[in-house]
Image (cartoon, rainbow, N blue to C red):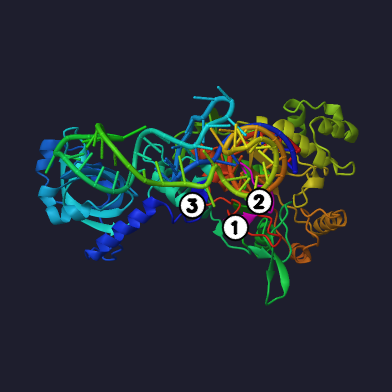
Amino acid sequence: MGGLSTLSEESQIIKQRKQKALELERQGIELFPNDIRKPERAGAIKKVYGKYDAEALKDVQDPFRVAGRIMALRRFGKAAFASIKDSSGAIQIHVSRDRIGSDNYNIFKKFDIGDIIEVEGRLFRTKTNELTIEADHIRLVTKSMRPLPEKYHGIKDKELRYRRRYEDLVMNDEVLETFRTRARIVQMLRSYFTSNGFLEVETPMMQSIVGGATARPFVTHHNALGIDLFLRIAPELYLKRLLVGGCERVFELNRNFRNEGISIQHNPEFTMLEFYEAYATYEDLMVRTEELFAQIAMDIKGDTKFIYQGNEVDMTPPWRKMTLNQALVEVGGIAEKDLSNRETLLARLMELGVDMPKDEVLGKYLTKLFDLLVEPNLVQPTFITEYPTDISPLARRNAKNPEVTDRFELFITGREIANAFSELNDPRDQKMRFEEQVANRGDDEEIPPEVDYDYIRALEIGMPPAAGEGIGVDRLVMLLTDSASIRDVILFPQLRPLSSKRPDGKGTK
RNA sequence: GGGCCGUUAACUCAGUCGGUAGAGUAUCUGCCUUUUAAGCAGAGAGUCGCUGGUUCGAGUCCAGCACGGCCCA
């Protein structure tokens, strides 16, 4: 696509625009002035005077001064209408030669769609009853050297929208709306935890030993220390060190990095909220999660029931709870007697087109089958509990059945949104599980290659009984903004660079 | 990693059976002082993603590659 070239300087439109800019400059017009006083906001003016009819506006003597981007321009020789957009909304202006004088009007004639301008004048209503500013003064604020996308269809190509989010934001108002909602959700999460006595902290993004999740990390190198560092895949082990240190309620709201595939619900860097609460169990966290999510839904949607991608989601507590095995039987159609039968599980996986090694722990087979057969069907909020211990190395064993842990994952609209458990705080058990993990690692890059003995040491100092949870913030935002792709809730999602050169000259792959 | 689809003007898109490139918006020129996807008349604007191949001739057919989307793993 021609539009994807980095700077298509040759385009005649751009040449013409630069030419016009030069002409304005020669006439002594500043193209990028820096003495614009803070303008009034289009949205605020509309909010107040939207109620005034033509008669009432005649009594409003005060002029209003706005600044914004010209989004539409309809010229008629000696007068023109334009739509001026700022971050609060758009307002129409009317510019006539008789009112601003022919010198100024000739300058205005050189303004283009996309330019940012300042306009001052009184309000009136047009024949078609649109609230409009009759310009007394008009001034260029920032010259635009490049044409905006088509005014009616805007910018639709998803690749262009993600690569040039600035243009997407200019053209598609709902984009800013989505990110405003995102900001509100983040703010609500933060204030929920803060007001419940949780301390917000920041723990290392660069870690010398990865941990806290099963995922391939990004590797970087610290020159002065002469060591490789990993971008964190989770903050968990540091937050639990803080529990040891006496921070009984902590949370961190920040980015994690996982060196894995990119998909409609995966971005290499994503935002996670992790919180830890001493003297609580995973069952307490279920209640907390219900309360928190219902509260956010009420605030954003005005209801705990809302539509996501055509399906109604009902977040009214309490939510459905099932054990992993129950879900596999009832939703996944696995026979109960097969749940511990490696051969039949493997055979079923083969049927589904998944070839897994024969020597994996049973939990891997069960969760893989769950991913395929159950997860997509969990549309309404559902807590899945009793995850096998062999795939939950940081979770506390269930008191009655040590083969499973006191853990849940939360699924909504067929996606994992949260993962929580009562924390393992017995350093002996933790050490055993870590060492076993590392011993069986092979060359699995998703498993840390070394045991974090300092974390064991911390547990030996003593971590109070606690429960912790991670919430996928991007996915929560997707749910509440009815976004189909994680890229729609991340301002600058990761894409392959357009022209990255490899040493072998073969392009980017 | 696999499958399907896409990539043509700044943007949104057509392009038939293989015959040498089209529209709308935007831009430029002219007309136009109440329009709102303003209107009317005219003009300019293209490495048809890239590289090869088949052919007298390729946007179109074939192969490879790049980037993206969706689905699967």
Above or below, A17 against A153 in this view is below
Q: CA distance from mark 2 to mark 3?
A: 18 Å
Q: Residues within 10 Å of mark 2 (few under 14, many from 20)?
A: many
Residues at marks 2 and 1 touching, judged by CB atoms closer than 8 Å: no
Q: Residues within 10 Å of mark 1 (few under 14, many from 20)?
A: many
Q: Amino acid at mark 3?
A: Ser
In the image, B34 versus A210, the foreground residue is B34
- Please give the residue where the numbered disc 3 appears in the rendered image: A191
User: Residue A358: which quarter of the image?
Assistant: top right
Residue at coordinates 54% horizontally, 55% vertically from top-left? A197
In the image, A246 versus A242, the foreground residue is A242
Which chain letter goes with mark 3? A
Magenta segment boundaries in residue numbering: A254-265
- Is the same chain shared between marks 2 and 3? yes
Q: Earlier in the sequence, mark 2 or mark 3?
A: 3
Position of residue A342 measured from the top left corner of the image (x, y, whole percent): 89, 36
Q: Quick check: can you spot residue A378?
A: no
In the rendered structure, the answer to whether residue A339 lies left or right of residue A237 reads right
Above or below, A1 against A212 in this view is above
Tell me the element at label 3. Answer: helix
In the rendered structure, the answer to whether residue A116 lies left or right of residue A300 reads left
- Please give the residue where the numbered disc 2 appears in the rendered image: A468
- Please give the residue where the numbered disc 1 appears in the rendered image: A250
Q: Earlier in the sequence, mark 2 or mark 1?
A: 1
Q: Amino acid at mark 2?
A: Gly
